[in-house]
Image: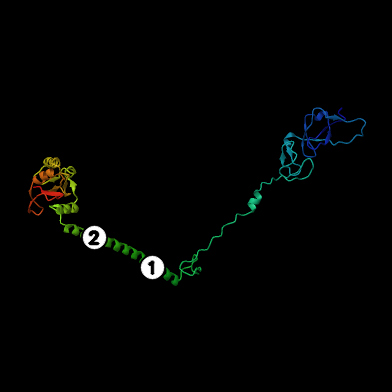
Amino acid sequence: MAGGATFSCDSCGKQYPWKPELAGKKAKCKCGAMLNIPAQPQMARAAARTPVAVPAAAVVEESAGYRCPACKNELTPGTAVCINCGYDLRTGQYVNTQIDTGEDEADAAPVPKKKKKKKMAAGGGSGKPSATGWVGVSKSNREKTAEQEADKSRTIKQVTIVVALVVAVIGAVFIGKFAFSRLGNKTSDVKMPGQDAEATRMLAENMPMEAKDFLASHKSRMIGTQWTQAKAVLKINQWYEMGAVKVYVPSDGLIARSVIIELPQDKEKRAALIGWQRVNEDENGHIVTIKDEGQKYVIYAIP
């Protein structure tokens, strides 16, 4: 059986004679593929056919490896095409082993860059670039003079604006004072009953506070120089019980020398409050006799 038995290459199909002493060993086909010689022959030759000379497979050591016959690159047994050089072990021809990923075209096509606009040199006014407007070239005396004149013009404009604003503010303050003074004069010119004119002036010119709030805002505050805070609170409560609408202290200091009482509309209550201290002194020390003239306020000097 050994004389007509053969085995074939799995890669290219080429047949080789099988011999018992080669069973189980490895051989190398002419196509470069490694052959595993089978333990049994694949087929027996037909006795009637003309014998055909079949070249014997060359036995190779397993350590020699499986290499490409063209570039000698080491291959995995059973590989049909060498990925290193593209040699096809079955046909003996080279094939293209590169894969088109589209990256070559992307690498080949450069990204277009935006063109930078050239900056115009400062100080020409005509829109044309200056011959001295480039790096490393100093400006001409004409351009330097033009820049200095432009800076000076801007400075003058800024100073003018600031001065105009200051003048406007000062003018507004003086106009306001003049208007208020005229208004105050018109108010004083109006004939007011009793002490209303004086009381209105004192309330407008000072920082009046409600009498009890005045005392509570600071422990050292007093109404008059002879009243303690406790006695002053008792007097204020008494005025409110008598019908006072509100009791004012026309002062923001520590000692108030007078109080302003806003009178109610009720005649009896008005009479009681006016009669509490009918004869009094004004802030200049003049004796004042208080009587009901339909006034809104009465002023009491506190000793």
Q: Distance between the residues labelled 1 and 2?
A: 38 Å
The colour scheme applied to this rendered structure is: rainbow
* Image position, residue 29 (x, y; %): 79, 37
* Image position, residue 12 (x, y; %): 80, 38
Q: Is residue 50 left or right of residue 35?
A: right
Q: Looking at the rendered structure, which numbered label has been put on residue 87?
A: none
- Identified by mark 1, the residue type is Ser
Crowding around mark 1 (Cα neighbors within 10 Å: few <14, some 14 to 19, many 20+) is few
As helix, strand or loop, the secondary structure at mark 2 comes to helix
- Identified by mark 2, the residue type is Ala
Q: Is residue 266 left or right of residue 68?
A: left
Is residue 257 visible from the viewing direction of this image?
no
As helix, strand or loop, the secondary structure at mark 1 comes to helix
Front label number (1 vs 2): 2
Q: Which residue lies furthest to the bottom in this view?
A: 142
Q: Which numbered disc flags the more N-terminal residue, 1 or 2?
A: 1
Q: Looking at the rendered structure, which numbered label has been put on residue 179?
A: 2
> Split into 4 quadrants, where in the image is the N terminus?
top right
* Residue denoted by label 1: 153
- Pick whichever, 198 or 157, lies toward us: 198
